[in-house]
Image (cartoon, helix red, strand yellow):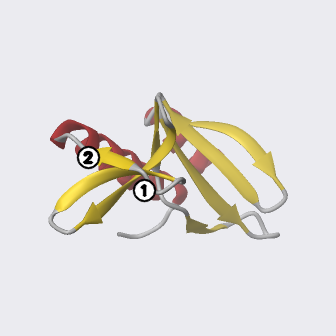
Amino acid sequence: MTPEIAARLENLNIQLMAEAKGYCMFVRGDLMAMAYRSEDGSFRSLGSSGIMTENGLAYLVWRGAQQVLATHGGGGVPASAEQAETVQRFSADLKAALGFSE
């Protein structure tokens, strides 16, 4: 990871929590996202951002006209406006820090 990316992550209070071959897990509070990193060290794609809930990691999805925090088991609960904004802000901040254009 370049010093510039590390500084942007730090300024946005985003931490690199784990690394595996080709993948990095980033967190901020109870938010999490995975990013794919190529062999040259550049970030190539960003997975969906999720939020930890009492039912495990949930992703912000649309079901009809409603935003829902959906879990892997197919369940989900309606997302509050604050939860939706928090997940979306984290995703946007992480994209910016890693150098993805919107």
Q: What SS does tag 2 mark?
A: helix
Residue 10 at x, y percent in the picture: 53, 33
The one nearer the camera, 53 or 23, is 53
At horizontal 67% and vertical 64% (from top left) the residue drawn is 36
CA distance separating discs 1 and 2: 18 Å
Quarter holding the C terminus is: bottom left
Quick one: label 1 or label 2, which is nearer the N terminus? 2
The secondary element bearing badge 1 is classed as helix
Tell me, yes or no, if residue 12 can be seen here.
yes
Please name the residue that numbered disc 1 is placed on. Answer: 96
Disc 1 residue crowd, few under 14, some 14–19, many 20+, Cα 10 Å: some
Please give the residue where the numbered disc 2 appears in the rendered image: 84
In front: 20, or 81? 81
Is residue 81 found left or right of 9 in the rendered image? left
> Does 57 sit above or below residue 47?
above
For the image, the number of numbered tags is 2
Is residue 36 rendered to the left or right of residue 55? right
Q: Residue at x 18, y 58 (%)?
A: 66
Residue 67 percent location from the top left of the image: 23, 55
The answer to whether residue 92 is above or below residue 100 is above
Amino acid type, label 1: Ala
Please say whether residue 2 is visible from this viewpoint: no
The correct choice, above or below, for 85 with respect to 65 in the image is above
Q: Position of residue 57 (x, y in %)?
A: 52, 42
Q: Nearer the viewer, residue 70 or 12?
A: 70
Q: Residue at x 53, y 53 (%)?
A: 73
The kind of residue tagged 2 is Ala
The disc placed on residue 63 is: none
